[in-house]
Image (cartoon, coloured by chain):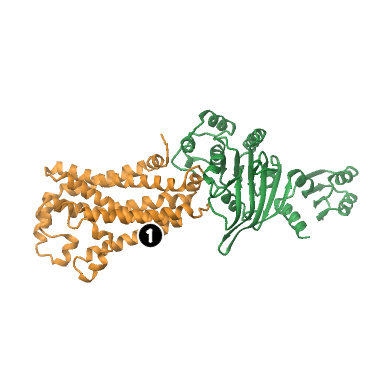
Chain colours: A orange, B green
Amino acid sequence: MIKNTITKTLYIKRWMLLSWCLGIVALVVFTMVFYPTMSKTLGQSLKDVPDSLKSFVGDSATYSTIAGYADLQVFAQLVTMTLIFGIILFTGLIAGEEADGTLQSLLVQPLKRSRIYFEKLIAAITMLGISCLSISFGVAVGLMIINEGLNAGRLLAATFATLLVSLVFSSIGFAIGAITGKRGLAGGLAGALAFTSLLISTLAVSISSLRTVDKLSPFHYFNKPGILQYGPHWDDMVVLAGISIVILVIGAIVFIKRDVYQP
Amino acid sequence: MTEAKTAINLRGVTKNYGTKRGITDVSLSVKAGEIFGFLGPNGAGKTTTISLMIDLIRPSKGKISIFGFDSIDDSLEIRRRVGFLAGDIALDKGLTGWQQLEYFGNIRGSFNKKYVKELASRLDCNLNRKFKTLSRGNKQKVGLIAALMHDPDLLILDEPTSGLDPLVQSSFNKIVLERQKLGKTAFISSHMLSEVQEICDKAAFIREGKIIAIKSLSEIAKKSPKQIQLFSHDKALALAVKKLSGVKNYSYSGSSITCTYMGNVNLLLNIINKHHLDNVTIQDADLETVFMKYYEGRND
């Protein structure tokens, strides 16, 4: 059953993944079934919200459609959850296993370090993907309950964009962990960068001086404008994927050559 | 001796850790089919040397070859031929011993269930329990099976019997000796002379990152200091022992004589035979005392 590092990692993390996804589905369904009530209440109360605050809470027009509601209340909110999941998961697979000594037990097997690195990465991306798909699944269940509909292609595109932006910061955690072997440093730096990026991109809507810096922020390329409302932005997704690839390749190059100490 | 008949060859290997000491100019050679002990106190550089051999870390200077293969360029080939046990074995907590071994077997391209079951039986190891539920000794057994299960040409073991009960230690020693008869090599690191002296042909002593002596175990046993305690009220015996050449750290309490003895054991037994004795204990000196003997000898 456990044929390689990919299947081993998926097997080891199966309960964590399952419970996380069940929680996400429940949260998304819960959010979606409140759409009829929220669209009326928020639509009215957001009419007088100043422009500077609309980037945080949306405007009344956003809540008038199920697509706008799901863009803002589901994807824009839950991306932080998948980020946390991704950073914890990705930093644990090399830096975490190095700290507890299991990585060393694997490195003495006849496997190239590059193979170990990429098999762990594939397993982590698979789990992050499943976590993102659980958001879509929750949206679909919620839509059935409230008898609403959404473009399935756009829903999948929004899920893919969530995966890509989460992957950028998870990759930072993975690569720093592989380069330094320090889980705390990797997770802390990835988390701090994610928070900074999210803050800059959120504030840049209303603070013009941040707009140049915002272009360096990965969140600038995520869900702007909302994918469910306006369709996917493939060029933005290419940027996000490109950032992750560069970070992961740097991580692999250093990991292959560096010393790995026994605990 | 051709390179092919040499299992391990370290030539002037140095590993620097910035300001911390690693190992300095370590050279040693282990013949194929030999069981080689690598002795030193904690922090002497044993784990560093082993980590360099299996390419977990890279030397700052010097060359390492295993069966003629370079430790860096041919590390994959080396790891195919080596069975390794870390000093502090860590495997996936959520897997059973069997799942873990099956995983490593699949990575290596073959999993010999029959041989794994045989090893588990000989080492009295339950492979159906999850690793996180195992005691230190049982974790060590799973680690030993992982090192042995692919029938490697060379075993590199870091303190292999720590945590094992004497019966299992004995079974392990038998396995290593049986493998030696088949021409297999073993490199066993330890900070306890007793752990290696039963099975090793030769041993290297490492201290503060440097090799201070490489000796055959029979030579070590012959010259190894003994801790002697003689229980007797015979003052003549106490006096005779005190005068004996090779006696150090002598003390006499009136009812017992304690000392470290580094001379000919037959001379001591002759003296003991001539006097009345209530009891006697003779044991090998601790490793530090043995080290000091070689260390002092080297500096003379």
Q: Is residue A170 visible?
A: no
Disc 1 element: helix
Residue at the bottom extreme, as displayed: A209
Q: Which of these two is toward me, B232 or B45?
A: B45
Q: Is residue A33 visible?
A: yes
Residue at the top extreme, as displayed: B114
Q: Which residue is mark 1?
A: A188
Name which residue lies at 44% across and 53% down.
A95
* Rendered-image quadrant of the N terminus of chain A: top left
Residue A87 in the image, given as x and y percentages of width and height: 35, 53
Q: Is residue B124 left or right of residue B271?
A: left
Name which residue lies at 55% across and 37% down.
B145
Q: Is residue A25 left or right of residue A125?
A: left
Query: Within 10 angstroms of label 1, few (less than 14), some, or many (20 or more) residues?
Result: some
Name which residue lies at 14% across and 53% down.
A230
Residue A130 in the image, given as x and y percentages of width and height: 29, 44
Residue B113 in the image, given as x and y percentages of width and height: 51, 29
Does B180 appear above or below B281?
above
Q: Which of these two is toward me, B163 or B24?
A: B24
Q: Is residue B280 left or right of residue A229?
A: right
| Number of numbered markers | 1
Q: Amino acid at mark 1?
A: Gly
Which picture quadrant has residue B250?
A: bottom right
> Disc 1 sits on a residue from what chain?
A
Residue A203 in the image, given as x and y percentages of width and height: 22, 66
Q: Which of these two is toward me, A152 or B80?
A: B80
